């Protein structure tokens, strides 16, 4: 009978085999994954180059200058590795050359226990590590086993006097290393992938929020531009009075308005204001200028964001237009002043004034338009007025304000990623080193005094201590404990080879790096790393000096093994530094890219909304302004003033549509022009609640357009949209109203009575509408 547990064993084994042969890479690398991969590449190539210096010294001491060809190979590897840091080179190149020079060392080494033989073992081991980290697809298995088998055959053929157990252990060791890398490396990549997911989600949320906000802001600004230019100019002409006594000035203002309003009908952004000096050149009453000079104004232009300048000009234009229409004054005073932190702009008149409290209660006039516009741009606005005492508006704009840049990832995200990457990678390294040690012990590694068994127990205990959440809470004690574990491990690995005298090719110099990597992960500061490596150097030197009197070759082996252990520990510390540095650089690059893409998204969305003005009926207003600008119409004529009044009323209804109505506003604006073309008196009230999507907005607009189409010229229709508990309700009031026939997907909750239609849209109705129309 096959138990559940026994059935799971083959499945687990198959998953492990599949993992070894799978491609180990991030599916969609982000800033964290790219940081890990880039740091790994940099550190392994630097390590390959640095290790060649150890090989060069060891070969020189062991065989002298007779091995110049071999030494040239070491130099060539370093020369190829360093440029590869910046210019990508085939990942197979450096490890293949390292393996080849390692086999060459076996051929010319004086004996199996010489320092050159030990160094050659690590040259091949490092070749496998580097290959496993640079080449992350299944080709690496064939490459590693290929040169390991060649090394075994060469040693068996050329050095038959050596213990046959050594050449057989070469492919076993390389297989153990590459399997450990292939099994553990995906876990490290998963840390990066999880870190990438956080900013990905944040980017989506920020993009949606910012695009919606910026689009609403731009639509709002379009409405204000329309209000500040065409509407105010048409209103000033319709009102007559002092504002149109200078016909040439009126024509010039109409020409400027045409350029600005025409821009709203295109897919291009609105033109930016030329200068703060434009505050003195507003249509309406003559301006009495005061304050700073033109030169100072030009300097201020560079210290204020363009949206702030736009808002200031709009506020001043609104104030001057209001004074022209209602104040009864002969002129307005416009004063620009500046202090250390702010620009102060004042617009005043000595006219009739108004009841400010009453205006605020009705949310109308300057108390609403100027203050709201200023607040949107971060400008402080204050209005003072009373009946018979004139009006004074003071605007205060802060200088040298940096524009807001959407932030994707805060510092805590970087810290969390680095912390997680350090600890997780160190734990994986220690686990892999321990597993390799177990495999080499089982395969017959040198084990004098039973030291390897003790060494593996110390390594396992260190790993368990590192994994303990209780000990993690006392990092200083745990790091010190791991430091003692690293020194103990190095001593036991040396004892297993009788301190460099017997079977040094099996010296497990990798073992001490397990505890060292975990200690460095707990305290990654440069000061702690330098102190720890200094202690390690002193231990290696002390042990080598102790053995030197009895066996100089053994002392040299201790130094070589110490270079391996300490070098790998330094490499680990360097890896952590690189991850932090490359991660910060990748993050900055990602944020810059995100900001650029966001700006592009905002521009594209805003441009799409600009096109709605094409259907808003601006042609009539632009044509009228153009006739006045080119002199074919006199702004003082009664007919011209009547036409201007009609255009002003129409356009004011247009700008009353809230900029927050992204869907409903775009779909309903064409109904105004349609009604106007048919000669229908049409009143549209949309409130401030938008539809949830375009399908619902289309549903409402189609009902309105159908009834406008069936209403005879001269008739009137009132349409209002407001929220209810169930959804949005459209109410139509007029004569001869009806519901269009199928196939339009009208909601079931639609009632029709004499002169009245009420329709409530719900989620199911919107889904049906979208399905029927194909989302078009």
Image (spheres, rainbow, N blue to C red):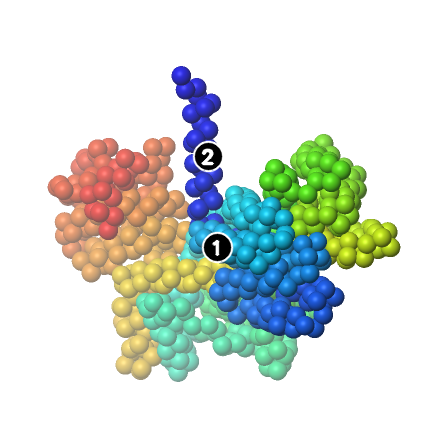
Residue located at (43% from left, 72% from top): 271
Residue 609, percent from left and from top: 35, 59
For disc 1, the marked residue is 146
Is residue 730 left or right of 396 when viewed as pictured? Answer: left
For marks 2 and 1, the one nearer the N-term is 2
Judged by depth in the image, the label closer to the viewer, 2 or 1, is 1
- The answer to whether residue 135 is seen in the rendering is yes
Residue located at (47% from left, 51% from top): 141
Residue 68, percent from left and from top: 65, 73
Residue located at (47% from left, 38% from top): 16
State the CA–CA distance, disc 2 to disc 1: 24 Å
Is residue 30 left or right of 293 when viewed as pictured? Answer: left
Is residue 395 left or right of 504 when viewed as pictured? Answer: left
Quadrant that contains the N terminus: top left
Is residue 537 left or right of 220 when viewed as pictured? Answer: right
Q: Quadrant of residue 180?
A: top right
Q: Quadrant of residue 581?
A: bottom right
Above or below residue 616? Residue 72 is below
For disc 2, the marked residue is 13
Above or below residue 193? Residue 79 is below
Looking at the rendered structure, the secondary structure element under dot 1 is helix
- The answer to whether residue 234 is seen in the rendering is no
Q: Which mark is residue 583?
A: none
For mark 2, does the 10 Å Cα neighbourhood hold few (<14), some (14 to 19), or many (20 or more) residues?
few
Residue projecting furthest to the front: 161
Q: Quadrant of residue 266?
A: bottom left
Front residue (pair 482, 566): 566
Residue projecting furthest to the top: 1
The reply to whether discs 2 and 1 touch (Cβ–Cβ < 8 Å) is no
Front residue (pair 415, 399): 415
Front residue (pair 368, 69): 69
For mark 1, does the 10 Å Cα neighbourhood hold few (<14), some (14 to 19), or many (20 or more) residues?
few
């Amino acid at each position: 009978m096959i138990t559940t547990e026994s059935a799971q064993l083959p499945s687990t084994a198959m998953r492990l085999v599949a993992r070894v042969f799978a491609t180990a890479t991030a599916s969609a690398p982000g800033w964290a994954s790219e940081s890990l991969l880039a740091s790994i590449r940099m550190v392994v190539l630097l390590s390959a180059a640095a290790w060649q210096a150890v090989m060069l010294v060891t070969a020189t001491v062991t065989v002298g200058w007779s091995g110049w060809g071999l030494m040239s190979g070491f130099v060539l590897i370093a020369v190829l590795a360093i440029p590869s840091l910046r210019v990508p080179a085939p990942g197979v190149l450096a490890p293949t050359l390292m393996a080849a020079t390692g086999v060459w060392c076996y051929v010319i080494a004086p004996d199996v226990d010489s320092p050159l033989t030990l160094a050659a073992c690590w040259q091949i081991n490092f070749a496998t590590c580097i290959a496993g980290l640079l080449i992350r697809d299944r080709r690496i298995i064939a490459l590693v086993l290929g040169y390991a088998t060649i090394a075994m055959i060469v040693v068996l053929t050329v050095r038959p006097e050596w213990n046959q157990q050594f050449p057989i252990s070469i492919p076993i060791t390389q297989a153990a290393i590459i399997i450990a890398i292939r099994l553990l490396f995906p876990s490290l990549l998963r840390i990066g992938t999880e870190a990438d997911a956080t900013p990905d989600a944040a980017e989506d949320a920020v993009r949606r929020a910012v695009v919606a906000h910026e689009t609403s802001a731009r639509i709002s600004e379009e409405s204000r531009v329309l209000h500040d230019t065409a509407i105010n100019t048409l209103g000033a002409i319709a009102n007559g009075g002092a504002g149109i006594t200078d016909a040439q000035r009126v024509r010039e203002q109409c020409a400027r308005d045409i350029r600005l309003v025409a821009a709203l009908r295109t897919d291009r952004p609105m033109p930016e204001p030329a200068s703060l000096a434009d505050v003195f050149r507003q249509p309406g009453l003559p301006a009495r200028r005061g304050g700073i000079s033109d030169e100072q104004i030009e300097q201020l232009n560079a210290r204020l964001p363009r949206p702030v300048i736009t808002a200031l000009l709009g506020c001043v234009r609104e104030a001057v237009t209001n004074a022209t229409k209602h104040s009864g004054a002969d002129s307005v005073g416009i004063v620009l002043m500046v202090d250390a932190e702010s620009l102060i702009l004042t617009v005043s008149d000595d006219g009739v004034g108004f009841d400010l409290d009453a205006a605020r209660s009705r949310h109308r006039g300057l108390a609403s338009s100027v203050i709201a516009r200023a607040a949107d741009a971060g400008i402080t606005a204050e209005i003072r007025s009373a009946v018979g005492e004139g009006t004074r508006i003071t605007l205060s704009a802060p200088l040298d304000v940096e524009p807001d840049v959407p932030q994707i990832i805060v510092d805590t995200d970087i810290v969390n990623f680095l912390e997680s990457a350090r600890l997780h990678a160190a734990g994986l390294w220690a686990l892999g080193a321990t597993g390799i040690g177990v495999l080499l012990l089982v395969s017959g590694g040198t084990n004098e005094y039973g030291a390897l068994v003790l060494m593996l127990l110390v390594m396992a205990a260190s790993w368990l201590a590192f994994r303990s959440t209780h000990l993690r809470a006392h990092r200083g004690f745990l790091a010190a404990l791991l430091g003692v574990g690293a020194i103990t491990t190095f001593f036991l690995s040396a004892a297993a080879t009788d301190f460099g005298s017997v079977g040094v090719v099996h010296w497990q110099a990798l073992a001490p790096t397990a505890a060292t990597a975990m200690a460095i992960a707990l305290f990654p500061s440069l000061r702690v790393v330098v102190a720890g490596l200094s202690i390690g150097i002193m231990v290696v030197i002390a042990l080598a000096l102790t053995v030197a009197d009895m066996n100089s070759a053994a002392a040299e082996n201790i130094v070589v093994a110490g270079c391996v252990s300490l070098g790998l520990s330094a490499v680990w510390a360097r890896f952590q530094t690189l991850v932090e540095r490359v991660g910060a650089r990748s993050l900055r690059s990602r944020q810059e890219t995100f900001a650029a893409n966001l700006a592009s998204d905002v521009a594209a969305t805003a441009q799409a909304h600009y096109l709605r003005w094409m259907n808003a009926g601006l042609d009539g207003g632009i044509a009228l302004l153009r006739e006045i600008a080119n002199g074919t119409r006199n702004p003082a004529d009664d007919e011209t003033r009547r036409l201007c009044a009609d255009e002003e009323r129409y356009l004011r209804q247009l700008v009353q549509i809230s900029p927050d109505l992204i869907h409903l506003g775009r779909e309903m604006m064409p109904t105004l022009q349609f009604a106007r073309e048919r000669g229908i008196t049409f009143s549209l009230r949309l409130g401030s609640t938008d539809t949830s999507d375009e399908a619902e907005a289309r549903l409402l607009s189609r009902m309105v357009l159908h009834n406008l189409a069936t209403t005879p010229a001269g008739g009137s229709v009132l349409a209002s949209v407001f929220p209810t508990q169930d959804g949005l309700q459209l109410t139509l009031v007029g004569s001869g109203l009806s519901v269009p026939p199928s196939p339009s997907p009208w909601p079931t909750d639609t009632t029709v009575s004499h002169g009245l239609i009420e329709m409530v849209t719900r989620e199911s109705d919107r889904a049906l509408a979208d399905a029927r129309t194909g989302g078009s």
